[in-house]
Structures are given as structure tokens and as C-alpha cells.
Amino acid sequence: MVVAVSIAGVGFGAGPAAAAVTSRGVTIPDFYTPPAALPAANGSLVRAEPLALALSLPGINSSLPGSATRVMYKSTDSNGNPVAVTGAYLEPAADWNGPGSRPLVVLAPGTMGQGDQCSTSLALQYPLILGVNSGQTTVSIGYEILAMYQLLAKGVAVIQTDYPGLGTTDRLHPYVNRVDEGHAVLDAARAAKALPNTSITAQSLVGLYGYSQGGGAVASAAELQSTYAPDVALTATYAGAPPADLIKVTEAIDGTELVGALGWSVNGFLQTDPSLRAVAEKYLSDAGKAALADLSTMCVGDALFGYAFKRSTSWTTTGKSLADVIEAEPSLRSFIDQQFIGSRKPTGVVRVATGVADNLVPHGQARTMAADWCRLGGKVVYAPILLPDVFDPLLNHFGPLLADQGTAVSWLTDRLAGRSATSNCGILPILP
């Protein structure tokens, strides 16, 4: 049984069961199944279709806050192979009141999960997805809608990426893979400009927006732009709470409400580098293997209900934590080190926002990324968010997202309107 709930009251039908792909009882639309062959050029459109926004109002000339198109486009994964990525382009109903062409923002979602039913483009159509099938349940909430709609209200066009494997049914989502996510962000900008009948132009400036997993994705994209996508006119990036150092994030997240994210990471690592399976066989217990298989189809809500406050020590044969395993195994440590963000100068101005009390995606490692970029000559606006420590890691992490979101959207929009920003690298050493 599947129930997909939206404000507009739209639901999934049962549909034909024979060829349909399902994830935890949710039928994935055929759109998300990639073709056998993909175009050669990165950012090329594979397919597109109108997307009905669940949260919209009638307007004079068009629905508010705008109209949407579901897209699939070609990108390149961290192994150099072609990959299909889905997402959604949103055309604002509001006018752009700044100079030049209407700008474009690529929104990289925060953690949604690893099941195909968790994709953000699907959440635009169904903001609340509930599924039940053979004892498995799922719940997915489209929380990134708020940021997208704030950008649309300012007359900024938005394209959000689902990332590889989140929605598309041909592979697992390679969660927090630096290159896969950075490429998907940059190629989303190319795909948006390839869409016909939009109000953006070849001259439209591009901004990036992301928090948490999305903050890491856009931070990576800002580092990769000069070599991977120099044609993308990247002007400014908002990187909120980026997981720049996965060693420190792994240590912090273990035993919290979001420990399931460690399973998503391991699943993605094993898919990207099959040689790591020997390490997994060495350490993963039967309980650990079962947990990883279970998590591979889960959304955030499912992981919270099923795995909150568990520790990765319960997944290993030795009782070692995942952080201990990384420390003990050079091949795994080398793979994790390759995910580090902060060793390459970013393109454009970057606002790095991080909650000082954030102990889920630790404040210190995000601050270090900003400092590293400063040393590389990057133009960085470091923004420590001062909120009280509420002694709950998940709330300490999501509090800054809500408290800073309006400021972040306005900051990014100002940059796209040509207003300059002054780097505060000089005073970063005295900031918290």
C-alpha cells in the first residue's frame, strides 16, 4: 500500500505492478529510469516533462510561485563514467528586478536518504510521501521547498539536483561523494540553460545554494568549477554546514539521531570503489550487513525511526566503531581523505555559514574549510551562527538552517544582482 500525501491532495495510484520500480512500497515514476545510452556532453538534457507543484497558488499570468519542469541530464561520476541525474527546474512567476538577465541558482538538497522515493524533485510534487510494503515503511518530507520558494519570490530561477542515484533507479545514491555531487551541481546549471522556453539566458549569472549535505555539494562544486565546468558563470555560493572532513563528521554523527547517514556513506563508498568490499567483509557483522541493506532504501524519516541513537559498534564483528575501522584500514582512510573539501581554491565568493553549537556536522571542521580556502586566496565570507547549545545534535544542526535561511537567500540574491561582498578572511582567526 502506498499513500503519497500533498497539500493539493494528489496521491499515487497502485499502477501496473509488472514493470514498475518500487522502493519501500512507493512506485517510482518511469521518468526516473535512465535510458541505456546517454548524450556525450555533460549537462545535456536526456528528457524533460512538466512537473505539477503540490504547493502552488493561482496567479494572474502564471501559478505562484512559478512553474516546474522535471529534468534528467547527463553528468560524469567520480570514476569518469557517464551517469544520469534527475532534478527540477523552477521558472519564477515573479519578475527579476536586478540588472541583466534573470539569474539561476542551483540548489543542492540536504540529506534526504538513499531510497529512490526520497528525491527532492519527487518531493516538489508530493511534499509528504508515505509508503508501506511487506512490513517496510517510509516517510519523506520535502523540506527544501522553503528555500526554493524564497528564491523564486525574489525572481531567481532555480534548478535543484537530486544527485546521482537518488531518484534514478540504475544505482545507489553515492552519499557525500565529493566529486559525484559537485559534478551533478555544475551540470544542473548547464541543463537548466539547455532547457527551451525559459527566461534565463546564456548570460545569466549562476549561484549555488546548499546546507548540510547540500553545503558540501556546493562547496565541492565551487572547487571543481574551474577545471570541470569553466563555462558555468559561477558568481557566488552559499555553503551552509558543509561536511568537509568526513573523518570528523563520522566521529560526531555516530550514536546520534542521524547515525543512519553512516550506512548511506558506506553503501555509496562500496559502490564507487568495489575494492573496499574486502574491508567491509572483514568488519561487518550480519547485523551490520542487514542494517546497510535496510538503510539503502530509506529516507531520513525512516532512519530516524529505525536507527536513532544506535552506534556503529553494533554493526561490526570486532566491536570497533566505523571511525576506528577507518583509522585501522589504509585503503578506506585513503578513500575518505579523497573526499576532503578545502584543498582547492573556490570560484567566486563563498559564504560559509556554520552553527557554532553544531556538533552533528561539527562546526570546527566547517570553520577549518573556510580558513583553508582563505589561505588559498579564496574570497570567503565566514559566518558563524550563534545559537544556544540545546544539547541535541540534530537540533543543533538544523537550528542554524532555519535561523540563517532568510539571510542566506538575501546574501546570495544580492551577489547575483551585482552587489559586492567583502571577504572577512582577515578577521577569521578571531571569530568563533
Image (spheres, rainbow, N blue to C red):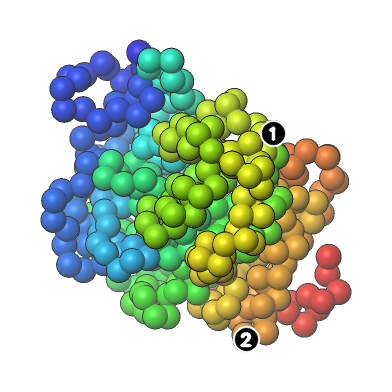
Q: Secondary structure at mark 2?
A: loop
Is residue 302 visible in the rendered structure shown here?
A: yes
| For residue 261, above or below residue 194 | above
The circle on residue 309 is 1
In which quarter of the view is residue 330 placed? Answer: bottom right
Q: What's the residue at 82%, 76% (across, down)?
A: 429
Say which amino acid is labelled 2: Gly
Q: What's the residue at 46%, 24% (across, down)?
A: 138
For disc 2, the marked residue is 377
Residue 237: image location, x then y, percent? 54, 66
Q: What's the residue at 31%, 46% (across, down)?
A: 171
Q: Mark 1 or mark 2, which has the lower sequence index?
A: 1
Residue 86: image location, x then y, percent? 31, 48
Say which amino acid is labelled 1: Phe
Tell me if mark 1 has few (under 14), some (14-19) or many (20+) residues whose alpha carbon lies within 10 angstroms of its own: some
Q: How many marks?
A: 2
| For residue 103, above or below residue 129 | below
Q: Secondary structure at mark 1?
A: loop
Q: What's the residue at 34%, 25% (across, down)?
A: 26
Residue 174: image location, x then y, percent? 42, 52
Give the position of the C terminus as an image quadrant: bottom right
| Cα distance in 3D space between marks 1 and 2 | 40 Å
